[in-house]
Image (spheres, grey):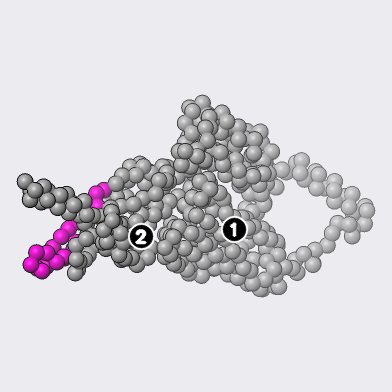
Amino acid sequence: MVRWIALLLALVASSAHADSLRLVVPQTQPVVGEMIPIILRGEYTSLITLETLTFPNSDQYDWIQLARDQWRDEQVDGRTGRVLERRIAVFPRHAGPLTIGPVTHHLTVVGANNLREPLDVTAPPLTLTIAHFPAESTPLSARSLTIEETLSAAPGALRDGETLTRRVTVKAEDTLPHLLPARPALREPWLISFAAPEQRTMQPTPDGPVTTVTWEWHLRPKTGEPGVLPAVAIPWFDTAARQMRTAEIPAIPFGYASFRDNRTGVDHLPTGQISAALLAVAAGLIVGLAATFAGLSRRRRADMLRKLRRLSPFDPTRRRLKRAARTGDLFAIRRAGERYLRRRRELGLPVSGRETAQLDAALYAPARNAPAVGAEMAVAAVLRHG
């Protein structure tokens, strides 16, 4: 009887210290494109001579390995064993359920009578729920995102015939090169633009990849008439603050200094000529407004239309936002709010950047930290800060 009890205890002990592999994932509520850090942790008591561990590919996510495998001796349940840790970063491509695994570690171990034998240790699959990206723009999630710009000369005071070199570098943490936006097109009717090949690099670190993209343009005005290169907005989801942000490539004035220096002002004209000129302009505006508008350059026509849109009391995005509020769907309100705020940015109307902070926290912060936000409160925040 004692012998059978000892044998049973030995079997229980051996099963308690059996070789194992598992996926370790933090408790988060990831959105599309957000980095999910995963640790593959293996605990082994067998004597391993060969091993192969391959993380599975999928059309549901992108992934990279962040650092070399770490093998070490460690006390596991009071017994010394070999521990493996492999750091993986997964980037979901779609919203909804995401299944990762199973993952199998193929081992060759020393068995009975010192003979080598194969052993497969498998980590069971796990399923995560991926939230929709909180804006209608291309998903871009990062722990931080910065923009640096360098100019070869003062863009608004170029020498005649001078070409401006503009270089913009976008640096983001915890994202992949192909997830950063495409190079913006700098096209204006009065501009000659040549774009150099872009450079995209990625540096893996144990905490996540650091990705950089550099864009370079060579720009020259077609005429001496000054213009403005508009700002370029890059919306992105801040995974640390759990809210949307907008990075911006700033607008710059553009033109030859000689055009400004050679202009003459109406204040140098005699008073009689000034009065006659003003009467002629007024008559021209009244009689030929439509013809004048049709004869404007594309850039000036766009500026006039933008000003008219700013003055117009009709805002279709505001109506859609209030319509979304009646549904009570916070995700629908988030999308409508993004359209409303994007329109304001395009028209140069004031936007603080904090309009959706409370709503983002309710949708994407961990459940224990998420504030209670109702539909009316969310819409009021967007309209109040707008």
The answer to which of 196 and 361 lies nearer the viewer is 361
Q: Earlier in the sequence, mark 2 or mark 1?
A: 2
| Element type where label 2 sits in the image | strand
Q: Is residue 316 visible?
A: no
| Disc number placed over residue 71 in the picture, else none | none
Res 106 visible: yes
Establish if 32 lies above or below 53: above
Stretch in magenta: 106-125
Residue at horizontal 45 percent and vertical 50 percent from the top: 139
Residue 249: mark in rendering:
1
User: Where does the image place residue 294, in percent across and percent down from the top left?
Assistant: 65, 47
Amino acid of disc 1: Ile
Q: Crowdedness of circle 1 by 10 Å Cα count: few (<14), some, many (20+)? A: some
Question: Residue at horizontal 10%, vertical 51%?
Answer: 7
Residue 70 horizontal/vertical position (percent): 33, 65
Reply yes or no: does residue 107 show up in magenta: yes
